[in-house]
Image (tube, grey):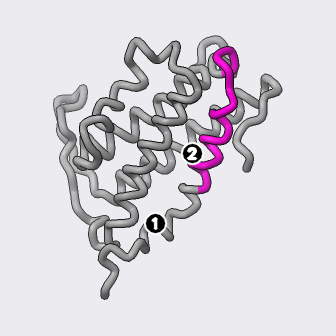
Amino acid sequence: MGFEGDGILAEFYRGWEVYQGRLVGAIAPLDRAQLDLAAAPHLWPVRTLACHIVGARAWWFHSWMGEGGAEFGRMLEWDEDEALATRPAAEVVRGLEESWSVINSGLERWSPADLAKEFERPKPNAAGERPRRSRQWIVWHLLEHDLHHGGEISFSLGMHGVAGLDL
């Protein structure tokens, strides 16, 4: 049908790109104390939530589907490494933008038929299994993951009187 590489998926997921911009817009002006805000003491602070978004993007797009280069692959550890507690807003924004670039590149390149391709989990889960997931499942899962944690970021900021995502 001529859908190859024409950006039809990127157009379909355009709202995700808008959300990405609003997520970056909410994180960029934050100082260190604001990045440490959380909805409750036992919940992740804003910085951890944002870094977890970056790490999950690397997990699904790089580890599962082989997208992006080595630097993107290193972002896999963003929600677990020692720099987590001190990463400034500018670095978090860089991670969000670079990881989004990899996602958007795939959405621009893939055809609707490419969504059916399946990938095996790169290493066994806790049950010792290596399930398979389609590209469509991975893209949808990561989109809902971004929305979930972005909502937590917005809620955490808002309850402390700081502007959240401009929705």
Q: Main secondary structure of the magenta part?
A: helix
Q: Quadrant of residue 58?
A: top left
- Structural crowding at the residue carrying mark 1, measured as other residues with C-alpha within 10 Å and reported as few (<14), some (14–19) or many (≥20): many
Return the x and y of residue 104 as percentages of the image width and height.
42, 57
Residue 115 placement, left or right of 14? left
Is 25 covered by the magenta stretch?
yes
Q: Disc 2 residue type?
A: Leu
Q: Which residues are magenta?
A: 18-34
Is 56 covered by the magenta stretch?
no
Residue pointed to by mark 2:
147
Q: Choose the circle earlier in sequence order: 2 or 1.
A: 1
Residue 92 placement, left or right of 57? right
Query: Front-most of 12 and 126?
Result: 12
Observer-side mark, 2 or 1, equals 1
Query: At 43% from the left edge and 74% from the top edge, which residue is drawn?
Result: 8
Residue pointed to by mark 1:
10
The number of callouts visible is: 2
Q: Is residue 51 above or below residue 18?
A: above
Query: At 22% from the left edge and 57% from the top edge, which residue is drawn?
Result: 118
Return the x and y of residue 153 as percentages of the image width and height.
64, 32
